[in-house]
Image (tube, grey):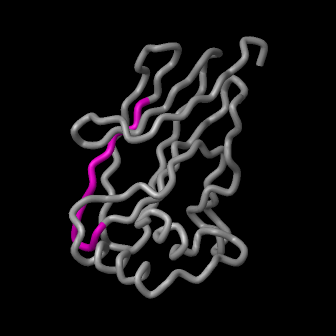
Amino acid sequence: MLLTTLLLTTSIYAGQVPEPSAKEVKTVLDYYYQGERPILAEVYLCAKVEEKDKETKHNCVERFGSTAAKGDVVYVYIVAMVPRKQKGELMVQAIHDGVVRSTKDITLTGRWFRSRAWRAFALRKPGKWDFKVLGGSGKILRQMTVNVPADS
């Protein structure tokens, strides 16, 4: 329920969003001011993060599907709520055909109600690419896959 409320109370979604109940809002606000660890609202693979347009700056404006071309850059894009004055440590791993190719750290802070972070990875080889978001303890929080065909 808290995650649903978080999704409804953030402004990252276009269109009309149902108004949450007062109880839902209070739950989210209480967690923001008194919670202890981040909650991942969304994690997905992104093809483009906006850098110029003020209305959509730092938003993922184009998502990846299940396939990509050799040489494409994929962003692992994370949207989270981090309680005020707290931090969250994450790791993002890029795994090509079962072999870890890269691990990048992310620190999320509770400076804003909504925290966004992304890390870029180049898809230099054909095959199956898995991307894992891990908590500070190494627990897998999310996993996504994109395939790069050999003929791309």
- Magenta stretch, main secondary structure, is strand
Residue 97: percent from left, percent from top? 52, 13
Q: Does the magenta stretch include residue 84?
A: yes
Residue 142, quarter of the rendered image: top left
Q: What residue appears at the point 51 percent right and 18 percent down from the top-left corner?
A: 96
Q: Which of 64 and 122 is in front in this view?
A: 64
Give the residues in magenta.
83-93
- Horizontal arrangement in the rendering, residue 139 relative to residue 63 (left or right): left
Q: Is residue 129 above or below residue 27?
A: above
Residue at 47%, 52% in the rendered image:
78
Across and down, in percent, residue 110 comes to: 30, 68
Q: For the point 52% across and 26% down, which residue is it?
A: 130
The foreground one among 69 and 133 is 133
Residue at point 22%, 38% (across, down): 137
Q: Position of residue 117 (x, y in %)?
A: 45, 54
Q: Is residue 112 above or below residue 108?
A: below
